[in-house]
Image: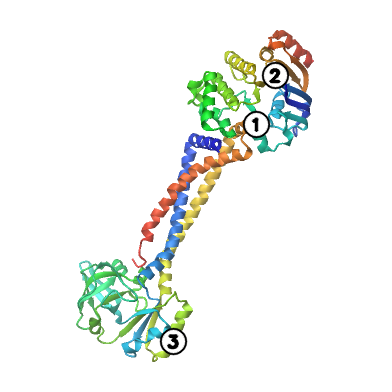
Amino acid sequence: MTTLVELTAVSKSYDGAGGRVLDDVSLDIEDGELTAIMGPSGSGKSTLLNLIAGIDRPSGGQVRVAGEDLARLSEARLARFRRARLGFVFQFFNLLGNLTVLENVLLPAQLLGTRPTPARARAIQLLTQLDIAELADHYPARLSGGQQQRVAVARALINQPLLLLADEPTGALDTHSGEQVMELIQGLNREGQTVLLVTHDAKLATRHAGRVVTLIDGRIHDDTRLEGASPRPESLVRVRIQEDQR
Amino acid sequence: MRAIFTVAWAEVRRRRLQSVVIVVMVALASGTITLGLNLLQEARIPYDRAFEAQKGAHLRVFYDARRVTPGQLASTPASIGASSFAGPWPSVYGTLLHRQSPDGRSRFQLDLVGRDSPHGRAELLHLASGRWVQAPGEIVVTRAFAEANRVGLGDQLVSLRTADKPVLRVVGEAVDISQTALASDYSSIQSITRAQRAWVLPEQLADLAAGGGLGYQMVYRFGSLPTQAQLRDAMGRFQASLVPGAISGSSTYLTTRTDYQADNQFLLVLLLAFGIFALVASLATVINLVVGTVLAGYRDIGISKALGFTPLQVVASLVAAMTIPALAGCAVGIPAGAALACPWSSRRPSD
């Protein structure tokens, strides 16, 4: 296995905000892993995700993704890096409301310069795989939350990214839809897709992830690899977090 | 590029009302400014164009028939290096005429010129309606005079200059490039340079001038447009070569052109000012909409960046979303402005 993400003594603080959001975080993520970053609100999970995505820059330390030191890249090169290497799934789907489902999915491929015919074929294939092909010409506002998140997943996968970043992908979904989306993500991981999942839901993390990294107050408190992504008793995880918070 | 266009076009579709506002504003602004600029341009060009087409006179000199003969005048073109000339035409200045019509009597003052043809090497006359004079008792007036005084073909004008009061029937209306409509405003003023001209057969001029006032007109053209100084120099040469008092007056193309431009200047300035105002107003509207779009689309901008749009591409997509309706507005406004300018540009200067 090769290391896809390397964080070395990364810290992040914002102007005017008291204290560090992230403090001396070092973390490696291997190719093919489904890693869950877990922790309570304000623990620095989303900040960590933004640093790995190059949306934000660290105050200290180094972030390397797919061998690239993100601090060395300009904004434009970071944008090109994101469109080629990363796929995003957000909590509130973040589809562009004035584009149809198919147009939303095709947009990253257009940015990458993929030819229209193969891009369209891939988009249709993904929509079919995600069981929403019949919604291709619909606008996002007409879809349910679960359907919108599937579209977001298809959009994230259109350029066959090295790393899929999912920020609370089930946060805005009901239990059933959330479970479906997580099974979908887990399925992608089984096919070799590296996934970094941010969630505050311990049950979700332990049920689907192969590795759970717990962040509290900007520091890594726990980093556990779960054998074969086998489910762990929810009660154990809850106890563990409570202990950490103490 | 495709991604930018996709996002921009989707933005245009979503914000239909704003897009329509931009189209209308830019169409109005570009249309008005095109109209204004066209008219400003045409105000200068068509006069020169028509002047050349009709071989307009650069210099017109009025001679006193009591002091010079047509034979003496024959040598004047060479003395000033004129490239062509016409005349001498017998003329009577400030002839008082009246018209008997059902709605009352009208009086006019005209400079009558004896001329047997509207053609020649200089100062061609364009017949706008009717025909040229063929017999004594017929008269051709300018279209500007006819319109200003509601004189039509077939109307009879009575000369009050002589006791026998000869009747002249209007048989034609001519466009004279050397006179503007402005001159008709001065028709009541006794002036050999400002009263409108009218034409009769040369042989009738002697009868109409009975009692004095007969003169000659000659028109001169130069190889290139002469300056005021060159024209003044030409007049100096005439005065030096002829007996004192032989020249009773003169006029130049510069005066006529200035009159023509002054005639149109107010309208043009007004249109141009309105065009600039409309452009500024539409620019303000577009800026307002851009700011509104940026604020409203803040979330979309963040998503676009996460998907891999570079900062430049984000700006480009926003600008394109505004440019598409703006271009549509220009596509409507500019041809419309040009089309509106056509009636003015096709108008003859003396019409």
Frontmost of labels 3 and 2 is: 2
Q: Earlier in the sequence, mark 1 or mark 2?
A: 2
For disc 1, the neighbor class at 10 Å (few under 14, some 14 to 19, many from 20) is many
Give the left or right position of residue B40, taking residue B295 as reference: left
Q: Which residue is mark 3?
A: B237
Q: Position of residue B185 (x, y in %)?
A: 35, 70
Mark 1–mark 2 Cα distance, whole angstroms, equals 19 Å
Locate residue A92: give its quadrant.
top right
Amino acid type indicated by mark 3:
Arg
Amino acid type indicated by mark 2:
Thr
Residue under disc 1 on the same chain as residue under disc 2: yes
Q: Which residue is mark 2?
A: A35
Q: How many numbered circles does the render carry?
A: 3
Q: Residue at x 51, y 34 (%)?
A: B10
Locate residue A232: give its quadrant.
top right
Mark 1–mark 3 Cα distance, whole angstroms, equals 86 Å
For disc 2, the neighbor class at 10 Å (few under 14, some 14 to 19, many from 20) is many
Q: In the structure shown, which secondary structural element does the residue marked by tag 2 occupy?
A: strand
Label 3 is found on which chain of the structure? B
Q: In the structure shown, which secondary structural element does the residue marked by tag 1 occupy?
A: helix
Q: Is residue A208 above or below residue B83?
A: above
Mark 3–mark 2 Cα distance, whole angstroms, equals 105 Å
Q: Quadrant of the C terminus of chain A?
A: top right
Dots 1, 3 in contact, CB < 8 A: no
Q: Position of residue B87 (x, y in %)?
A: 32, 81
Q: Which residue is mark 1?
A: A82
